[in-house]
Image (cartoon, rainbow, N blue to C red):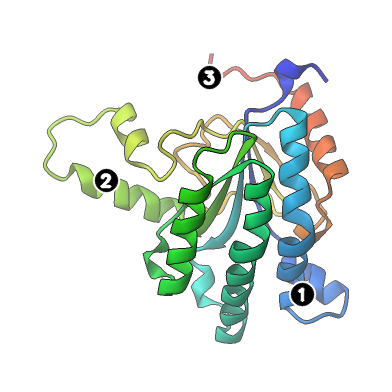
Amino acid sequence: MKSGNIPAHIAIIMDGNRRWAREHNLQVLAGHQKVADEVLEPLVEHAAARGVKYITFWAFSTENWMREPKEVEGIMSIFRHTIRKRWQRLHEKGVRVRVIGDISKFAPDIRKALEDVMQQTEHNTKITAIFALNYGGRDELVRAVRQFADCGHVSEHDISDALDTKGIPDPDLIIRTSGEQRLSGFLPWQGVYSELYFPSWHMPDFTPQKLDKALAEYGKRKRRFGK
């Protein structure tokens, strides 16, 4: 694949954790745990090695709060461990970490940990790993629009700068695992010209080799941006 065909920004809707757990006769949190412990770091490293500059993971949506309280509590525990241990490893490898979404809804210790890791890694340059936490596309747009309540004129640039992704290029490629062929409100403004890829395998099965397949598919696409 020519280097020019490598997307600058890949965004991933991490779907299928619970289905993977059921298929393997495991507890519902097992899929989430496997992704946190075994999947994310290799994907970030491999993306960086392939020349990708930004990789976004939609890890928790605004709707995910409606899941069973025990599952939500378990996911929060995974977050605490991942931020403290796994993201520290990313920092040691030169990865910059950013978070998008309304993190005000999380417990104070999680918010503090997120703020600390973003500050700690802000000068890293290997790749930027973005985690969408309590993120919903409509929620993001509502929060952005509120900033312009008294403005007479608002441009596309103004809106882009008011979004959580300010300073981050729009995704070139959006991947949704587990076979579902919809975006479910993921990056609705930023993803208008993104290429879409819907593999059938679940997120816990997402390996660097599968990322290469996605990149190969992307390399075949001809992007016209409406022209």
The label nearer to you, 3 versus 2, is 2
Q: Residue furthest top?
A: 227
Q: Position of residue 51 (x, y in %)?
A: 71, 27
Image quadrant holding the C terminus, namely top right
Q: Tell me the kind of residue under disc 1.
A: Ala
Label 3 vs 1, first from the N-terminus: 1
In the figure, is residue 10 to the left or right of 187?
right
Q: Tell me the kind of residue under disc 2.
A: Val
Q: Residue at x 71, y 63 (%)?
A: 36
The local crowd at label 1, few if under 14, some if 14 to 19, many if 20 or more residues have their Cα within 10 Å, is some
The image quarter containing residue 221 is top right
Task: Work out whether residue 33 or residue 112 is closer to the camera in this orientation and state it.
Answer: 112
The label nearer to you, 2 versus 1, is 1
Q: To which residue does mark 3 refer? A: 226
Q: Tell me the kind of residue under disc 3.
A: Gly
In the figure, is residue 88 to the left or right of 201?
left
Question: Residue 145, which numbered label?
Answer: 2
Q: Is residue 163 visible?
A: yes
Which element carries disc 2, helix, strand or loop?
Answer: helix
Q: Residue furthest bottom?
A: 70
Q: Distance of mark 3 from mark 1, alpha carbons?
A: 42 Å
